[in-house]
């Protein structure tokens, strides 16, 4: 247990930025909008969170600014995909390139700088519980907020009137429009809200996880989040499970490297991405056998109001 518990605790920390990004993408995709720009949005969030924290000394201001930056950047994606009906795959890839280039350019002079950031904040009583305590309740405030966010997103999607509209728009926008639902409004709100959560995932890396700015510090986590949305079958609870699973693989390979091994470090660093590819292959097989449910029917398809006529 002395070895397993630290790995599980590290898995929760490593999986948290992926969880934020995955939850944000679930909200976006449930409305029928596909956003493949998660990697770029996370980098913008990481840069914004770090810069604001660095200049104000307040991690909370940094996280708030990162959320707003994610919302602002996704205005571009929403306008292109919803208003102009542009190809959502191309727009997402463009967002990734934009975020990658912009964060590297603006953050070049801050490389290697450090901030105080958020630290571990054990929850009194709960952190002393055996196994569960050190794994889940001896973490930082952003981890605790992610627990709440999982339930909040689940409640939003499946238990609220707006969630019903979101699912209706994602599955059958023509029927939703006929029922008096504004497809564009629902998709705009979902895309902007989801983008804010994705950006928070990036900010976690700089403000909480590492307390420093490094170019391309997301290291493919945005792409892993895209795959996890499918792995989770667009459900927040399964998203949490999948995020911690991938975080566990990352934590395990880091522990193996720290303990000393003859396995080349680049090969160990490939483990999370090998798992990502494996999961996608398994999902493709299940989809082919008719066991794949939960995908919004209108995902990635532009909505033309004229078709109803």
Image: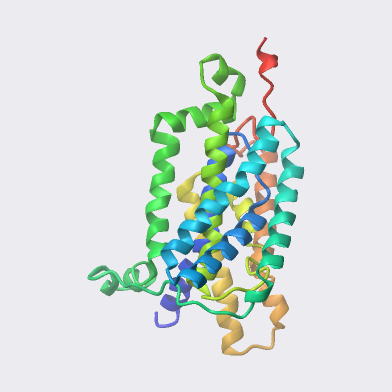
Looking at the rendered image, the quarter that the C terminus falls into is top right
Question: Vertically, is 289 above or below 128?
Answer: above
Please report the residue visible at 48 percent of the width from the left and 73 percent of the height from the top: 10
Quadrant in the rendering for residue 213: bottom right
- Give 225 or 309, whichever is nearer the viewer: 309
Name the residue nearer the viewer: 131 or 111. Answer: 111
One can see residue 234 in this view: no
Give the camera-side residue of 197 and 47.
Answer: 47
Q: Is residue 210 in sight in this rendering? A: yes
- 62 left or right of 275 in image: left
Horizontal side, residue 255 vs residue 87: left or right: left
x 63%, y 38%: residue: 78
Q: Is residue 266 left or right of residue 145?
A: right
Q: Establish if 287 lies above or below 17.
A: above
In the image, residue 293 sits, relative to residue 50, either above or below, namely: above
Residue 123: x percent and y percent? 28, 69
Work out which residue is located at the far top of the displayed protein and give it: 309
Place of residue 224 in the rendered image (x, y in percent of width and height, measured from the top left): 63, 58
Pinpoint residue 177: horizontal percent, then vertical percent: 57, 18
- Dividing the picture into quadrants, the one containing residue 128 is bottom left
How does the figure colour the protein chain or chains? Answer: rainbow
């Amino acid at each position: 247990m002395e070895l397993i518990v630290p790995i599980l605790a590290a898995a929760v920390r490593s999986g948290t930025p992926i969880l934020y990004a995955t939850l944000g993408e679930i909200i976006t995709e449930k409305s029928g909008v596909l956003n493949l720009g998660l990697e770029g949005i996370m980098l913008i969030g990481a840069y914004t969170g770090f810069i604001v924290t660095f200049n104000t000394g307040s991690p909370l201001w940094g996280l708030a600014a990162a959320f707003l930056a994610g919302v602002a950047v996704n205005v571009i994606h929403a306008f292109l995909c919803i208003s102009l009906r542009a190809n959502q795959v191309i727009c997402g890839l463009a967002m990734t390139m934009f975020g990658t280039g912009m964060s590297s350019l603006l953050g070049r002079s801050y490389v290697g700088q450090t901030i105080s950031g958020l630290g571990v904040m054990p929850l009194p009583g709960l952190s002393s519980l055996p196994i569960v305590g050190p794994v889940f309740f001896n973490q930082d405030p952003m981890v605790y907020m992610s627990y709440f966010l999982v339930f909040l997103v689940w409640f939003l999607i499946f238990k609220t009137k707006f969630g019903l509209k979101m699912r209706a728009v994602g599955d059958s926008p023509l029927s939703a429009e006929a029922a008096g639902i504004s497809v564009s409004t629902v998709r705009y709100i979902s895309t902007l809200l989801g983008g804010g959560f994705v950006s928070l995932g990036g900010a976690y890396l700089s403000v909480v996880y590492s307390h420093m700015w490094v170019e391309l510090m997301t290291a493919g986590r945005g792409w892993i989040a895209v795959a996890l949305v499918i792995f989770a079958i667009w459900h927040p609870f399964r998203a949490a499970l999948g995020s911690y699973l991938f975080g566990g693989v990352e934590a395990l390979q880091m522990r193996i490297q720290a303990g000393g091994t003859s396995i080349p470090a680049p090969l160990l660093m490939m483990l999370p991405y090998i798992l990502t590819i494996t999961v996608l292959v398994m999902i493709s097989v299940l989809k082919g056998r008719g066991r794949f449910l939960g995908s919004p029917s209108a995902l990635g398809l532009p909505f033309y109001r004229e078709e109803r006529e």
